[in-house]
Image (spheres, rainbow, N blue to C red):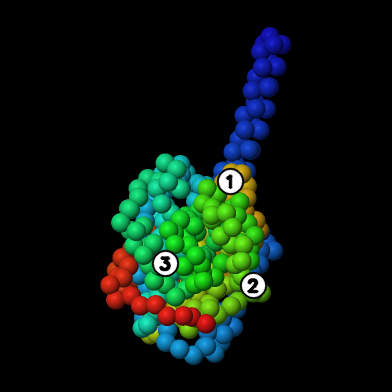
């Protein structure tokens, strides 16, 4: 064999080996760290919620404002390259005399051509619901969750009902291309809490930084005693929890800038919670199959019913 050919084959083999290792590391590998940990004391959350008197939510509505389409491995590392739908949701908790909006979706402009679908009427209903809400809560500061709030035509009127956390306010770069108007938050007093905080009867937030600095889960105890946990984008799909796998490192490291270890701890805690308390309904950030199943089960209602909406203050 000629020396030049031998050297070329060796070089090619090295390139293939390096490329294969890089592909595995950035696209496929997603092992749960042995020391993964996240504090989730559901008993404490229940006690805190139980100590706050008042009527609890009677119904949870949602709007599917649009959807993205991602490769499966971007959602669950190692799941291949077929396209998976990533719906964008906003939720509305309906109390007897008030309403709470959880996450605010985004419009077509913020989607910047990346949206596979968009429902302008659904987005308009989200904007109207924000105007009538007594409380607005954001699971985290990414554009598809906070964008609708930043775009509200009368932001000064809805900000008093909005409980942005200190971390969400401190990291506007994580919301881009969504941006609050210049000066909009100059006199805003953000929510500061340690790990758990009750915001209204039957409603608590649980700090869960990792996917973003300002990530938090939203725990809801309904009037009938059922429990729903909106986990934001700790997991995009329920499969992340079932198989205990994160998004591909290519996505978490170069696009999301996640704290992977923190997210792994949360995925582990959520699986343990599900095994110990299977009656608690866990709702990932972009899982249309889970949401569809909850509609069939009567847990969620599609569409914001704003005709009978009322507004009152939440302390």
Left or right of 167 on screen, residue 154: left
Q: Examine the rendering and report whether any part of residue 277 can be seen.
A: no
- Cα separation, mark 2 vs mark 3, equals 22 Å
Of discs 2 and 3, which sits in the foreground?
3
According to the picture, the residue beneath numbered tag 2 turns out to be 192
Residue 38 pos. (x, y %): 64, 69
Q: Which residue is mark 1?
A: 255
Count every numbered label the image shows and give the total: 3
Task: Establish if 219 lies above or below 78.
Answer: below
**Circle 3 — which element?**
helix
- Residue at the image position 66 percent from the left and 63 percent from the top: 36
Of 243 and 265, nearer the camera is 265
> Where residue 37 appears, x then y in whole percent?
66, 67
Crowd rating for badge 1 (residues with CA inside 10 Å; few <14, some 14–19, many 20+): few
**Is disc 3 surrounded by few (<14), some (14 to 19) or many (20+) residues within 10 Å?**
many
Asked whether disc 1 touches disc 3, contact meaning CB atoms under 8 Å apart, the reply is: no
Marker disc for residue 218: none
* Number of residues whose C-alpha sits closer than 10 Å to that of mark 2, classed few (under 14), some (14–19) or many (20 or more): few
Specify which label sits upstream in the sequence, 1 or 2.
2
Q: Disc 3 marks which residue? A: 130
Q: In the rendering, at what x and y percent does residue 220 appear?
A: 46, 77
Q: Nearer the viewer, mark 1 or mark 2?
A: 2
144 vs 277: above or below: above
Name the element at disc 2: loop
Q: Going by the image, does 279 lie left or right of 249?
A: left
Of residue 123 and residue 218, the one placed in the foreground of this image is 123
The residue under the point 51% across, 51% down is: 178
SS for dot 1: helix
- Residue 158 at x, y percent in the picture: 47, 67
């Amino acid at each position: 064999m000629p020396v030049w050919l031998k050297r070329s084959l060796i070089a090619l083999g090295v390139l293939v080996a390096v490329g294969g290792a890089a592909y595995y590391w950035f696209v496929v590998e997603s092992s749960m760290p042995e020391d993964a940990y996240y504090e989730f004391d559901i008993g404490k959350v229940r006690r805190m919620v139980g100590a706050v008197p008042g009527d609890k939510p009677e119904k949870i509505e949602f709007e599917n404002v649009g959807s993205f389409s991602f490769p499966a491995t971007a959602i669950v590392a190692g799941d291949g390259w077929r396209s998976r739908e990533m719906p964008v949701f906003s939720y509305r908790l309906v109390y007897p005399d008030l309403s709470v909006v959880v996450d605010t979706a985004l419009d077509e402009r913020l989607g910047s051509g990346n949206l596979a679908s968009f429902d302008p009427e659904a987005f308009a209903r989200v904007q109207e619901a924000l105007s009538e809400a007594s409380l607005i809560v954001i699971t985290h500061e990414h554009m598809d969750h906070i964008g609708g709030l930043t775009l509200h035509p009368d932001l000064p009127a809805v900000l008093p009902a909005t409980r942005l956390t200190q971390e969400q306010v401190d990291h506007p770069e994580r919301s881009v291309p969504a941006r609050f108007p210049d000066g909009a938050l100059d006199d805003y007093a953000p929510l500061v809490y340690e790990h758990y905080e009750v915001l209204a009867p039957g409603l608590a937030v649980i700090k869960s930084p990792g996917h973003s600095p300002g990530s938090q889960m939203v725990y809801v105890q309904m009037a009938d005693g059922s429990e729903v946990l909106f986990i934001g984008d700790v997991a995009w799909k329920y499969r992340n929890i079932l198989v205990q796998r994160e998004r591909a490192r290519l996505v978490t490291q170069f696009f999301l800038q996640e704290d992977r270890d923190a997210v792994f701890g949360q995925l582990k805690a959520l699986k343990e919670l599900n095994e110990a308390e299977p009656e608690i309904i866990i709702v990932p950030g972009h899982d249309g199959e889970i949401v569809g199943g909850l509609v069939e089960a009567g847990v969620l209602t599609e569409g914001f019913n704003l005709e009978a909406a009322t507004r009152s203050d939440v302390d």
